[in-house]
Image: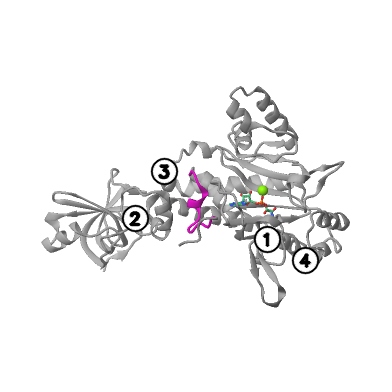
Amino acid sequence: MAEVVRVSELSKHVGEEIALQGWVYNRTDKGKLCFLLVRDGTGFAQCVAFKGDLAPELFEQIMRIPQESSVIVTGSVREDKRAPGIPGGYEVGIKELKVVQAADIDYPMSLKDHGVDFALDHRHLWIRMPSQWAILKIRVKVMSAVREYLDSNGFFNLDTPILTPAAAEGTTTLFETPYFDEGFAYLAQTGQLYNEANIFSFGKVYCFGPTFRAEKSKTRRHLTEFWMLEPEIAFCDLDGLMEVEEGLISHIVQTVLRDCQAELKSLGRDVSKLENIAAPFPRISYDDAAKLLIELHEKETDPEKKDLLKFEWGMDFGAPHETEITQRYDKPVFVYGYPTAVKAFYMEPWPGRPEVCKSVDLLAPEGYGEICGGSERISDHDLLLKRIHEQGLPEEAFKWYLELRKYGSVPHSGFGMGVERVTAWICGIEHIREAIPFPRTIKRVYP
Ligand code: 4AD
Ligand code: MG
């Protein structure tokens, strides 16, 4: 039997007879020729059946093969610049074809256009389509680039629990679950607090896993279950943190550009917008961003836009504000020093300005908004306890967290990066729900 080769490796087998194992994504007939677009997980490749080369029954069978049938195609690899596919440029001249299973002919996600709700109801099939496959393949690369960067820069990956005893990112977005005789547990909104314990044993750590927010927001940037990368670093201040963030994001973008050209091309992504994403990234203070937004609001003459741009010091940014800030740069931009009131309880105050905290958000270009959020953490025990009281958080549940400030406390910082937001930005897609295999939103837990 011919050697089984994957679509992504076809270029290395020109002139050889090989076997492809996969599924028929599409079929087109041109008289004596029948073209199958076969996908195998690594790409999509054109396979050509020529009537004159094949037994009549086999050619007939290929002409009738339903979309999504599983097949083993044997044939010889040819280079042909015009051959469609991802990456394309190579095709297989069919000599034999074995149907593993002939798909039912009522395939719900057939090649015609589907509404987004229909597509989401059939997500288990939708992920087979080229666009979804390309997005998810880029997500895989984003995740491996994250690990590659941190593992080679002295970070240790320690997992943090998903069932937790208390809120860490505000009490309004908690998923609660009964927990035996202990009362209630909550799905983790962040692994940060446990990362903070881990740095006192390992110095530089990260956790990387699913994160839950009972988020009422229906925006294109919010999921109720998403994947967050969270690095945490001992002896690190806000400037040191921004250096790690820009190094990481540059590495991710450059790695995707290097390894996912075909996927980006198939998505129609303008890669020139990604090519100059390299450290350093611009840094502006919240104060300066606020000043800019207030001026823009004053100057705006279109009443509708003026209303959207309304801003005063102390507010968190809305999407229109983020767009105004980010469109001034062709790289992600750091905004640091947010008002304490709009950020989480654990953030270190700005020296001499307690109304401001040592926080930093990284905003992506092209309207994608916040991709990373982080801060320097409060390292003083009494100040942290005061914050916990002020926020009405249960002191008992934070006893262990407070203890970290009693035994060798140091300045330390960390951030969280949303995998789906970064993937959506790199892919240039509208909604982050396509950047996770099975999205969870307030309206959806199926399939
Ligand atoms: O800014 P957030 O809420 O920060 C934290 O949770 C910190 N504890 C992280 C840390 O310092 N260790 O979330 C961090 C990032 C956001 O910038 C965003 O990219 C993503 O997580 N994110 C979401 N992604 C999708 N859907 C949601 N509902 C998200 N909420 C946050
Ligand atoms: Mg945030």
- Residue pointed to by mark 3: 265
Q: Quadrant of residue 277?
A: top right
Secondary element at tag 2: loop
Label 1 near ligand 1 (CB < 8 Å): yes
In the depicted view, which residue is nearer to us: 32 or 93?
A: 32
- Residue pointed to by mark 1: 191
Which mark sits nearer the N-terminus, 2 or 4? 2
- Residue pointed to by mark 4: 397
Q: Answer with left or right where residue 87 lies relative to residue 150.
A: left
- Residue pointed to by mark 2: 109
Say whether marks 2 and 3 touch (CB < 8 Å): no
Q: Give the range drawn in magenta.
A: 429-441
Three-letter code for the amino acid on which mark 1 is drawn: Gly
Which mark sits nearer the N-terminus, 4 or 1? 1
Say whether marks 1 and 2 touch (CB < 8 Å): no
Label 2 near ligand 1 (CB < 8 Å): no
Three-letter code for the amino acid on which mark 4 is drawn: Ala
In the depicted view, which residue is nearer to us: 218 or 89?
A: 218
Give the residue at x 34% y 47%. 113
Residue 447 in the image: x percent, y percent?
Answer: 45, 62
Q: Indicate whether 295 appears above or below 79.
A: above
Mark 3 vs mark 1: in front: 1
